[in-house]
Image (spheres, helix red, strand yellow):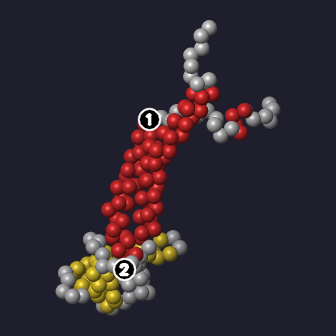
């Protein structure tokens, strides 16, 4: 056995096996699903990041904790009352509130950005990062499948065609 590499091993243009159409469809479905998850959350997560919503007061009622390996995750649920006559929202969760942040019956400033059962503190949230990454992953997969790869394949065909002497048939 020799230590020599095949000629195409160092060449970026090595021959490629065609991708399975089923794999392409599966990747496209994953990409569409990621975009589907991210798009409806773009507005609320951006509003939550800026604490841009209906201001009001959150009253802590119940602490729920789950013990994980090495740490404890807690959330406070309670009631939200909007300033300036908005709708009262019972049984909502205060995003990012842990065990030490509140006590039962304590009131704190919060913002309602339109989520079904979630309100945010004045510091906003970092949920937008995950939403942006989901959207970026979905769009990047779609771009790779339906824009970048076809362009690369088209260039490779042109290069191969030009290397064949312009594609003119040879007469023997």
Q: Which residue lies furthest to the bottom in this view?
A: 106
Quarter of the figure with the C terminus: top right
Compared to 112, does 24 lie above or below?
A: above
Please tell me whether mark 2 sits on a helix, a strand or a loop.
loop
Residue tagged 2: 51
Compared to 31, does 159 lie above or below?
A: above
In the figure, is residue 162 to the left or right of 132? right
The percent position of residue 153, horizontal first and vertical second, equals 53, 36
| 10 or 33: nearer the viewer | 10
The percent position of residue 160, horizontal first and vertical second, equals 59, 29
In the figure, is residue 105 to the left or right of 5? left
**Residue 80: image tag:** none
The percent position of residue 166, horizontal first and vertical second, equals 58, 25
> What residue lies at 51% left-to-right and 70% top-to-bottom?
69
Quarter of the figure with the N terminus: top right
> What residue lies at 80% left-to-right and 36% top-to-bottom?
3
The percent position of residue 142, horizontal first and vertical second, equals 43, 48
Image depth: mark 2 or mark 1 in front? 2
Where residue 155 sits, quadrant-wise, is: top right
Q: How crowded is mark 2: few (under 14 residues within 10 Å), some or many (20 or more)?
A: many
């Amino acid at each position: 056995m020799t230590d020599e590499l095949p000629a195409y091993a160092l060449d970026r243009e090595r021959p490629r096996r065609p991708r399975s159409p089923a794999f392409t469809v599966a990747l496209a479905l994953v990409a569409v699903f990621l975009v589907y998850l991210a798009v409806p959350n773009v507005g609320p997560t951006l509003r939550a990041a800026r604490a841009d919503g209906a201001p009001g007061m959150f009253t802590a009622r119940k602490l729920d904790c789950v013990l994980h390996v090495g740490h404890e995750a807690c959330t406070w649920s309670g009631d939200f009352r909007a300033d300036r006559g908005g709708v009262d929202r019972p049984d909502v969760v205060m995003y990012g509130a842990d065990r030490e942040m509140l006590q039962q019956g304590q009131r704190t400033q919060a913002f309602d950005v339109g989520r079904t059962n979630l309100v945010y503190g004045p510091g906003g949230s970092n949920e937008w990062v995950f939403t942006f990454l989901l959207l970026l992953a979905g769009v990047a997969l779609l771009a790779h499948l339906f824009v970048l790869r076809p362009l690369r394949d088209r260039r490779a065909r042109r290069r191969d065609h030009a290397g064949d002497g312009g594609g003119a048939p040879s007469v023997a």
